[in-house]
Every structure is written in C-alpha cells, then in structure tokens.
C-alpha cells in the first residue's frame, strides 16, 4: 500500500486537518499514515479517522507528500533524525509557526518541494484562515494541493510571498486572540451592567459571529457596516467616540506591529 500523505506529529492541528480531509472525501483514510510518540494520540486518530498510526516517523517521512505538524521547537531535532527518510521529490508541507522555507531546505539538504503554511486555530472547527507560500522547488500544483487540504473542511486560504508571512502572523495567525480579548472585555462590560457572565458571553459570541457573517456575505466594507449601526447622537456613536478618544484603533495597529516584529525576531 502506497500512502499518499504522511503526517509527522498527530496533535491538535494535524487531527483537524486530517479530520476534514477524510470527512470531506479529499483523501481516503487508507491513504494516510501519521506518526506520534504518544499511544493515546495514535489510538484516537486511528479510531476516529480510520487512518494508520505509527510510533516512528520513517513511514510518513517516506510518503510522496509529508505534512510536518510538530511544534516549532522540536522540528529541528526531529528533522536531524528523520530527514534522511524524505524523498528527493516529496512535497513537504510545514504548518510550524515561524520556521522559514530556508530552514527546511537546509535541514533537507536541498531535497523536497517545500510549502510553508501559517494556519490559525479556527482550523480546528473547519473555519481556518491560512496563508501558504512556496519554498524551494514548490510548484503551482503543490500550492493548489496544499490549499485544498487546508480548506476541504471549510474556511479560507490565500497565497502570499514568504516575506509577508510576518504580516499574516499579525493579522490571522494571532488574530483569534484579539477577538477573544474583545469578547472578554464585552463580557466584563455586560456583567458590570447586570447581565450574568453566561448570558453576556452568549450575546457577545453570537454578535461577533453574526457581524463576521454580515461582513463576509454583504460585500460591504467594515467602515460602512459600522456607520450603518451608528445613528447620529445614538448609543453606538457614544461608544465609538469613547474608543476613538482612547486611541484604541492606534493601539490595535501598534499591537499588531509588535506581533509582526516578534514574528520577524523569531524567524531571524
Ligand atoms: N498559527 C497558528 O495559530 C497555529 C496554531 C496552532 C498550531 N500551529 C502550528 O501547528 C503545529 C502543531 O501544533 P499543535 O497545536 O497541533 O501541537 P500539538 O497538539 O502539541 O501536536 C504536536 C504533536 O507532535 C508530537 N510530537 C512531538 N515530537 C514529535 C516527533 N519527534 N515526531 C513526531 N511527533 C512528535 C507531539 O507529541 P507529544 O505531545 O507527546 O510531544 C504532539 O502530539 C505547530 O508547529 C504550530 O506552530 C500554528
């Protein structure tokens, strides 16, 4: 049996990607082999998805397509041991935050066609926003296949130059955290005004999900949609004026710049 996709690291992100691939029919379970050192992870993936799970990395590393899904801090040591199993002509996809295609090209000694992905955590529920970039020797087909793998369960992917991966990190990679931060503040405000935290959380979550859907589906810009709910002299206007007086927009822009700077530092 020739596996089509080998996966190294059967953690949360791999589980989400493989779950979508199998459930959507993009790949059949018998075409996938995944390695993870933890028996419980292997059992879970094998039982829930029907894929083959193994303890050592040689079988997945030897596949025509290899998804590298271990944490960035263990990637180097893992490749020092297992890069020798990766074929000259393999498509090698990394989802590790911050690691450049040059890093993988060095570890693979110039072998493989390398594609780098910056996913985000909503991928876990089929709503990821991922950016992909081509590394050494990657073809258009490699990028298309990778994007299909990432979006077969839903969500979005874009293709960017690698030099823009720090920008992607500050917008979508770390983006879910800004959204949760906003929700935390909305819930606190609701509680201050007398709501229970459970009710405030329900209202804030559905409001943000609904606003995102409105933005995605109407084709109107965020500034226009914001103006639409801001009647002159009304309640929303008072809130937005308070945000503006506090320089909140500038602070958000500065926060994302700090995020991109940190991404550049980590990748240097
Ligand atoms: N941009 C984003 O928002 C974002 C979000 C999530 C993830 N990511 C990227 O996605 C990757 C995976 O993240 P995750 O959250 O899925 O991590 P995770 O749940 O910790 O999964 C990694 C898995 O790899 C296993 N592993 C460790 N060493 C290994 C080795 N030498 N060979 C094979 N498997 C090994 C781990 O096992 P043990 O637990 O036993 O060590 C774990 O099961 C990371 O590189 C991360 O940077 C990016």
Image (spheres, rainbow, N blue to C red):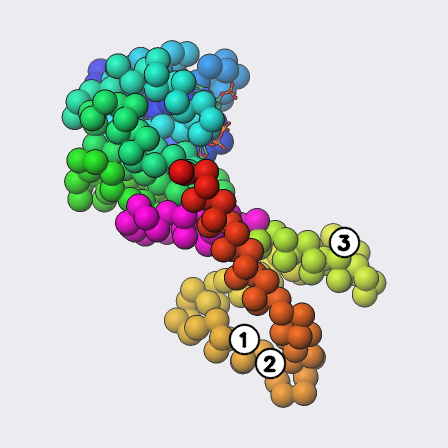
User: Which residue is identified by label 1?
Assistant: 226
Residue beneath the point at 49% across and 75% down: 223
Q: Nearer the viewer, mark 1 or mark 3?
A: 1
Residue interval drawn in magenta: 156-177
Residue at 25% x, 19% y is 86
**CB contact under 8 Å: marks 1 and 2:** yes
Judge the density around disc 2: few (<14), some (14-19), many (≥20) Cα neighbours within 10 Å: some
Q: Residues within 10 Å of mark 1 (few under 14, many from 20)?
A: some
Q: Are marks 1 and 3 in contact (CB under 8 Å)?
A: no
Comparing 103 with 64, the one in front is 103
Q: Is residue 3 magenta?
A: no
Across and down, in percent, residue 41 comes to: 49, 20
**Frontmost residue, 247 versus 53:** 247
SS class, disc 3: helix
Provide the residue designation for mark 3. 197
* Real-space CA distance between mark 2 and mark 3, rounded to the nearest whole angstrom: 26 Å
User: How far separated are the C-alphas under marks 1 and 2?
Assistant: 6 Å
The residue carrying pointer 3 sits among few (fewer than 14), some (14 to 19) or many (20 or more) residues within 10 Å by Cα, namely some
Q: Is residue 234 above or below residue 135?
A: below
Query: Which residue is tagged 2?
Result: 230
Percent from the top left, x then y, of residue 247? 62, 69
Q: Is residue 142 left or right of residue 80?
A: left
Determine if the magenta segment contains residue 168: yes
């Amino acid at each position: 049996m020739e596996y089509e996709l080998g996966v190294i690291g059967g953690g949360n992100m791999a589980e989400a990607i493989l779950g979508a691939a199998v459930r959507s029919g993009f790949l059949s379970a018998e075409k996938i082999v995944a390695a993870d050192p933890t028996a419980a992870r292997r059992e879970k993936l094998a039982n829930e998805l029907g894929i083959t799970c193994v303890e050592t990395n040689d079988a997945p590393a030897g596949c025509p397509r290899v998804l590298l899904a271990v944490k960035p801090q263990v990637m180097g040591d893992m490749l020092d041991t297992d890069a020798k199993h990766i074929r000259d002509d393999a498509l090698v996809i990394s989802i590790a935050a911050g690691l450049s295609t040059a890093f993988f090209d060095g570890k693979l000694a110039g072998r493989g066609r390398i594609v780098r992905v910056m996913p985000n955590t909503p991928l876990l529920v089929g709503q990821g926003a991922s950016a992909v970039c081509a590394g050494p020797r990657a073809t258009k087909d490699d990028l298309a296949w990778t994007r299909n793998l990432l979006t077969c369960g839903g969500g979005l992917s874009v293709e960017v130059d690698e030099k823009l991966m720090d920008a992607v990190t500050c917008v979508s990679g770390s983006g879910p955290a800004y959204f949760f931060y906003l929700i935390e503040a909305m819930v606190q405000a609701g509680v201050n005004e007398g709501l229970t935290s459970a009710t405030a959380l329900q209202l804030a979550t559905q409001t943000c999900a609904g606003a995102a859907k409105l933005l995605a589906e109407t084709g109107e810009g965020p500034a226009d949609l914001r103006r639409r709910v801001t009647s002159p002299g009304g309640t929303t206007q008072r809130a937005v004026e308070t945000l503006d007086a506090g320089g909140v927009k500038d602070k958000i822009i500065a926060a994302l710049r700090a995020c991109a700077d940190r991404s550049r530092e980590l990748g240097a």
